[in-house]
Image (cartoon, coloured by chain):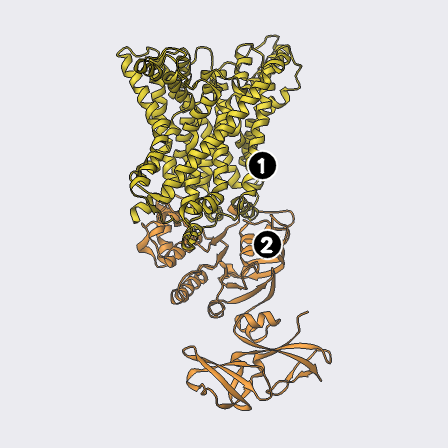
Chain colours: A yellow, B orange
Amino acid sequence: MGAALARLSSAGRRIRTLNSWTWTASVTSLLLIAPLLVVVFGLSAPANDLWPHLVDTVLAGYIVNTVGIALGVALGTAILGVSTAWLIAMCDFPGRAFFSWALVLPLALPGYIAAFVYGDLLEFAGPIQTALRDYFGWAKGDYWFPAVRSPLGAVVVLSLVLYPYVYLLVQTAFATQSATLIETGRLLGRGPLRIFRTLAVPLARPALVAGCALAVMETLNDIGVMELFGIGTFTTGIYRAWFGFGDIGAAARLATVLLLVVLAVLWAERRLRKSLRYHPENDRSRPVIRYVLRGRRAAIATLGCGLPVLLGFALPAVFLAWWHVRAGAPIDPAFPAIMLNTLGLALAATALTVAIAWLVVFGLRLDPAFVRPFARTAGAGYAVPGVVVAVGVLGLCSLFDHAVDDVSRMIFGVGTGLLLSGTVTVLLFAYAVRFLAVSMNALESSYHRIPSTLDAAARTLGVFPRGMLVRVHVPLLRGGIATAAALVFVEVMKELPATLILRPFDFNTLAVRAFEMAHEERMADAALPAIAIVAVGLVPLIVLSRRFLQPNVAAETSS
Amino acid sequence: MMAGEAKHGLEVRGLSVRSQASGKALITDVFLDAKHGEVLWIVGPSGAGKTTLLRAIAGIEHIHGGSIVVDGRVLANRSIEVPPEQRRVGMVFQNAALFPHLSAADNVAFGLNGRARPARATRAQEMLERVELADVAERLPHTLSGGEAQRVALARALATDPDVMLLDEPFAGLDPQLRTDLAAAVCRVLRDSGTVAVLVGHNPEDAMRFADRISVMHDGRVLQLGTPEEIYSHPNDAFCAGILGHVNRIPVKVQGGQVATPFGPVGAPGFSEGSAAELLVREEGLLLGNGTPVMVRSVRSLGALAVVAIQPRDDSRILHARVPADSAPAEGTEILVRLDPARAFVFPMDG
């Protein structure tokens, strides 16, 4: 909020530059939120038979499951994230340097991949239960074993792969923002536990809320885990309404309700962050002096950081590799084509998304006051679940196609048929809606490092606006562009919900392939695309951990 | 110079600027003019609107009233607002604002569009020579010292041959000796270039020393515009009197067209009988030698000068006098002090 205010006032001091750039940026932003408007206003379309049926039978279950799992994941990621963040930020123990970045690794593992690994491992016929039965001589019904394909299972699996959001944000808050206050607390004679409870956690609450909100957003977006575990939630409901019944009206209604849930989460996040904040983050970035742990305590700390890494990343990764190796030589013949397909799609989507993001961010730079409302609204696509975006894009394209078809019939007497629906263009558009914010954030944060006086200098030297973009911004933004591109690329590769709904017939990506093969329990065929996704997903983590964990790295080298 | 005489230079008429964020008036009804080859120095406390005025002239701030005209060409008024890139106005920013990815020479050549590459390189080198920095041409900005960076920024702005040059606190953050040398060099280059130069600076001493004229700003208004001597000797008001040096402020009452001081009466023409007024006496306006006996309470040397705290008899007030250090009296002695009427001013008491 403080940063936003500062930006607002500096915006007021820049001159307004309404030109083709700012207009294009604003109109493009509007285009990107059009699908969401279609979802919301699609509700007024006449209902058909499926909707009342859904309301009577499954809607209550969807609400309970969706909200319950989201709350469970918020709690799970909070516990895992805060405890590991405290250990890394405030304590020294064997392996701390390693864990400080290894704890981020689970983010490379999409939930649906973790879900099919654990689903297979822990099911009745899976290796673990089989081994238990063989060892103890049990038979079916002799023993109790938690059902992995259950809402609780989904909570655990999602918490294991999503806690790094909380870890990253809270760890940074612990390590830097409250360093002076925590040191003051120590000097005043407070022990570690009391400092944790009375100082560190209260001070880090805004970061904790932000991290949990990210995890909850991912949970609401998830379709893979829910489908693989057979749990009825809004995402799976929307998917079935569209895929199973071809009822876009019912899908849009479900999507609207899901959108309301998302808005509620966003609103709660804003409110909580505001009311839980004690002071603006004006503390200088400085690492805190850490507690040195020895003996049993050090072992517990190592274990506490090791388990999340093991369960959230290492174990699933090892099993994926093992399944792949066990399958032997004949790899899935479809794989090379799918790989190429995915790379091409991700490249195209990245180029499109980064280009749009750049246009919008450049517009923001030229005239913040005018472009900001458009840019912020367009950026909201990231909070919107992929299935909702997909339903909106479907609706928008069918509106467009039918309008073009009608006009063509009227003028030429011949229809054009459906121009966009069912093409890759639709998919690219959906990715742009969904991932615009990711690339905008990366570009904006590197734009913030370019002082506005450089723009003013370029202008007074007669170089504006294209020359300023090409000769000043482009060379200074290379890092930001690379980051934005890497993040979008990986997001597109992993993306499942929107891709499942919008992909052209017989068009496969790695994510869809891994999901479908897992659904058919063909683990060997699911493993290879999953490994590819995880491998590519490691790239942005390097970028991420560099950006977030810098203060710690500095502390390590200086001490 | 013939062409220079035909040009009018910069004319700012009734300029007003409000904050876009809050609508608060940043500068109000500002009148200014400056000729080619002249260095106009704007002084005033922070928040006076000095930088806003420069930004408005450069075109990177909207105006809400008045006009900005250069050599008869309207840059901004009620209906016209020429964008900054077309104003032919150069600006040097407080932090130099050099493009970090370009060498010093490339920075200087940045605004030279529409020329062949070799011509640009030649011009850039020529400009660097003019600011005596030919040897840093290939260096990147982060390797330059603060003073060097400012001179490169000056060369960059001058390279496009602007009609008006604006310098926003170009010497801020430099140590005093460097600041004075740099100010001398910069003002020489500016005068030689024949441009209209408007410079914002904090240090009144530099302004007195290097400016052709000074504009005193306070609270978004120009209180006085004149040569350093005019402002020093004939300040418009108490604020202008105080900005170019240290003054003693003494509340007084006007009686019989004059005010009484411990050093005899000072004329106060035009004041109504019995009105409250303020007498401002420059510290260097209290002269030792003959006059009224006072006690010396303390003596603080500033090097060449000394500040002497004196207390007139029958008066609880301490006044300060600036005298040559070698003629400074000893603490605790009684000396004679008189007042230089040319360095004492009577102004109405502020509401």
Instruction: Tell me the chain of label 1.
Output: A
**Count the marks: how many?**
2
Across and down, in percent, residue A422 comes to: 50, 13
Residue B218 percent coordinates (x, y): 59, 63
Residue A142 in sight from this viewpoint:
yes
Q: Are marks 1 and 2 in contact (CB under 8 Å)?
A: no
Can marks 1 and 2 be said to lie on one chain? no
In percent of width and height, residue A174 lies at 42, 44
Residue to which mark 1 is pinned: A373
Query: SS class of the residue under badge 2?
Result: strand
Can you say which quadrant of the picture contains the N terminus of chain A?
Answer: top right
Q: Is residue A131 left or right of residue A166?
A: left
- Give above or below for B72 relative to A413: below
Q: Position of residue A349 (x, y in %)?
A: 44, 24
Instruction: Tell me the kind of residue under disc 2.
Output: Ile
Q: Is residue A475 visible?
A: no
Q: Which residue corresponds to the image point at 45% horizontal and 53% vertical from the top-left?
A: B161
Q: Is residue B9 above or below residue A266?
A: below
Quadrant of residue A34 within the rendered picture: top right
Camera-side residue: A466 or A61?
Answer: A61
Residue at point 33%, 40% (across, down): A297
Question: Outermost residue toward the top?
Answer: A414
Up-down: is A11 above or below A523? below
The answer to which quarter of the image holds residue B189 is bottom left
For marks 1 and 2, give the CA distance: 33 Å
Give me the residue at 69% from left, 81% from top: B254
> In the displayed structure, does residue A54 sit left or right of residue A78?
right
Q: Which residue is mark 2?
A: B68
**Which of the 4 quarters of the picture holds residue B247?**
bottom right
The residue closer to the viewer here, B13 or B118, is B13
State the residue at coordinates (41%, 17%): A144
Q: Along the line of sight, which residue is nearer the eye, A261 or A38?
A: A261
